[in-house]
Amino acid sequence: NPPAGSAGSYAVTFIVSDGTITDAETITIFVLPAQQNNAPVLEPIGDKQVDEGATLSFQVSATDADGDALTYTASGVPAFATFTGQTFTAQPGFFDAGTYTITFTVSDGKATDSETITLSVNNVNRAPVFTPLSDRYVVAGNQITFSVLATDADGDALTYAALNLPSWASFDAQTRTFTGTPQESDVGDYSVTFTVNDGLASSNLIVPIHVLSSGSGSNNPQVSGLNIFEDAAFSQIATQFNRGETMYISFMLTNNGALTQDAVDALRVQFEGGAVATATHISNNNGIYYYAVDVPLVDAALGDVHIIEIDAFNQTMQQPIQLPILNNVPVMDKLALDAQFNQTLADQYIFDLALFASDVEDANNLNWFVSGYDTDVITVDISGTLATILVQGDGATQIFFQVFDSEGDRDTHTVQVRTNTSQDHIFQCSDGIDNDNDGLVDLSDPDCDGGNDDSEHTLAQCNDGVDNDGDGLVDLADPDCDHLTDNDESSTIECSDGIDNDQDGLVDLADPDCSSSTDDSEEPTVLSQCNDGIDNDGDGFTDIYDEDCSSFGDDSETPEEIPVSQEPAHDLRGHDALYITSTALISDLNKDEVLVAISLENELGFDLEDVDVTAYIDGIDWKKSGKFDLDDGDQTTIRVQFDSRDLTPGVYDLGIIVQNDDIRRVVWRDLRVQG
């Protein structure tokens, strides 16, 4: 390895000898001067510019006199741009205006060449956009008022104006409000154009306005006293409806100034979206007509402004109403989804998401999305409603579920997920919980994810020490655990069931105050939470003698199996297919009563008779509905009323029990009460 400066020729002699005779040969070694490297040369790039929302792309190139392989790099590349190989691509958004300094470098492995350029992203103004408005209606002699609204993506100040205003109307540009009181002589159709300007661009909104006759002539029938109610008692004025709910309508009809009694032939509601529903006549009383109409479960029933059409005296009278018709949001069965993950995953896990959400309009036509999980622990794939979870490693993570309906409304829920690929102690399928919902608790069950397996022990769900029927007594030897009024349990009350009901870290064995986490009624020697037979630390092993149940990596659980009861098994049918599809608060605290609507759907595969619904707000009150029938495949909505004096604004736990002599379904829902 000749050093620098040693170029030249060198004579080297090689000698070989056997101790007596020698031989030699001389050779010449030539050391040549080191070859000079030529640095690569970057082709000029120059400064670049691009508009917000547009795309800029160009190639970077260079030459090398020695023909060496070249490598290209860039520094200072903005977040909205990429540089791959020799291609630079920028796609700036509408908040990326400004200048950026970027340096491109080429290297042949020995020498480099660079150029620094300025990338200018030009601001692009976006025109303001009006919120759409449907046709407006007003009866002559009445005031009409509405507001327009536009948004500007750039946050520019906006200026409003109105064109083609009728003589009987005005427009306040500061409040964006149209106001007018047309008279009988103004009956007809009008078209008003509203404009909005951000200083650089403008947009228009055309709103049709229809002035209807009041029928005030001496020989004309006239509608008055029109009211919309939310209840069959016609006592609560409605402020909005959801599709599928019943609208109750009352009004008076006069002819030649006299009240009529049986003059109405038919009543229809023409909804803003185009749907039409025919109302059912209920009664007449003292000149007042009472009707009911079900809001259709179709997209065309949505909107804010609708027309009531009344047929009488061989003509049709139209009365506009302004009343929002809302979409029913999809509802996840969050407790059931949590229960789906009440196990430690070791490998692939597949389940159908369609079982965990419902929507009264879209049925099962819902779209699911997941996010928020640690890809080092699991990966999740959604295909339609089928979810596939692949375990990637041991640990704990969470999954954020979102379900959307066709209107874009959603429900969300986050579940906790535990994984363990080497379960060699008491695993989740031996934890005494009915993981596969087949009515048998899992004690030594290699197939706890299959509802038809026969590998459990014979301890039935009704003997599992959990209060299945919700009567406050734990089920130990209970052949009738699906009935609230049975008396065949052990006398062990819920607060002595060995479960930490009050979540104070001690399991309840003799605890009369298990509803309060601050109680001191447990025995000081009571078994701690780490001995309760539940997998508290999420490592896949049930905690029986586990001093370190707060740590996922502990190894202190026992390898012993849980003792097996030899009680006979029971054929207990699961009731998850009786869906509580939605709950809604449809009146507020300004009323004497708070009305809660509970929607049910029967997918059990058989009809239900003499069903009642009990709704209870923990610590407040409970109400029970009357009995009703719910055939297989049918839906219904039950309304229960609570005294508003017992409630303050906030979020409450609403317990719902749906039951008859054959089934019982208990769920919890969040109930948000506003002042």
Image (cartoon, rainbow, N blue to C red):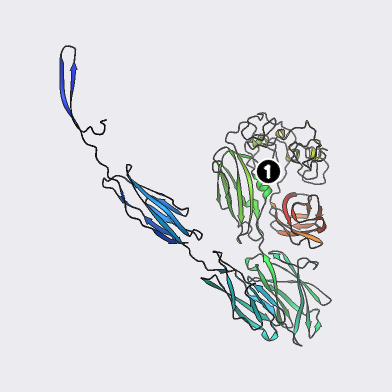
Q: Tell me the quarter of the picture where residue 645 sits.
A: bottom right
Residue 560, percent across and down?
A: 67, 28
- 23 or 244, nearer to the observer: 23
**176 or 290: nearer the eye?**
176
Residue in the image at 42% along x and 55% along y: 89
Relative to 97, is 314 on the left or the right?
right
Instruction: Name the foreground residue: 296 vs 165.
Output: 165
Look at mark 1 in the image and give the residue it sits on.
437
Work out whether residue 270 can be spotted.
no
**Residue 449 shows in this picture:** yes
Taking the image as shown, residue 247 lies to the left or right of residue 22, namely: right
Q: Residue furthest front?
A: 5
**Image quadrant for the N terminus?**
top left
- The answer to which of 303 and 165 lies nearer the viewer is 165
Q: Is residue 129 left or right of residue 659?
A: left
Residue 106, placed above or below residue 9 = below
Up-down relation of residue 17 to residue 576 (above or below): above
Q: Which element type, helix, strand or loop, lies under badge 1?
A: loop
Q: Is residue 409 above or below residue 8?
A: below
- Compared across the picture, whether 365 is left or right of 457 comes to left
Answer few, some or many: residues within 10 Å of disc 1's Cα (few below 14, many 20 plus, some between 14 and 19).
many
Image quadrant in which the C terminus is located? bottom right
Label 1 is placed on what type of residue? Asn
Residue 470, given in percent of the width and then of the height, sits at 78, 45
Q: Position of residue 534 (x, y in %)?
A: 69, 36
Q: Quadrant of residue 674?
A: bottom right
Residue 21 percent coordinates (x, y): 15, 13
Q: How many numbered circles does the render carry? A: 1
Residue ranking furthest to the bottom: 218
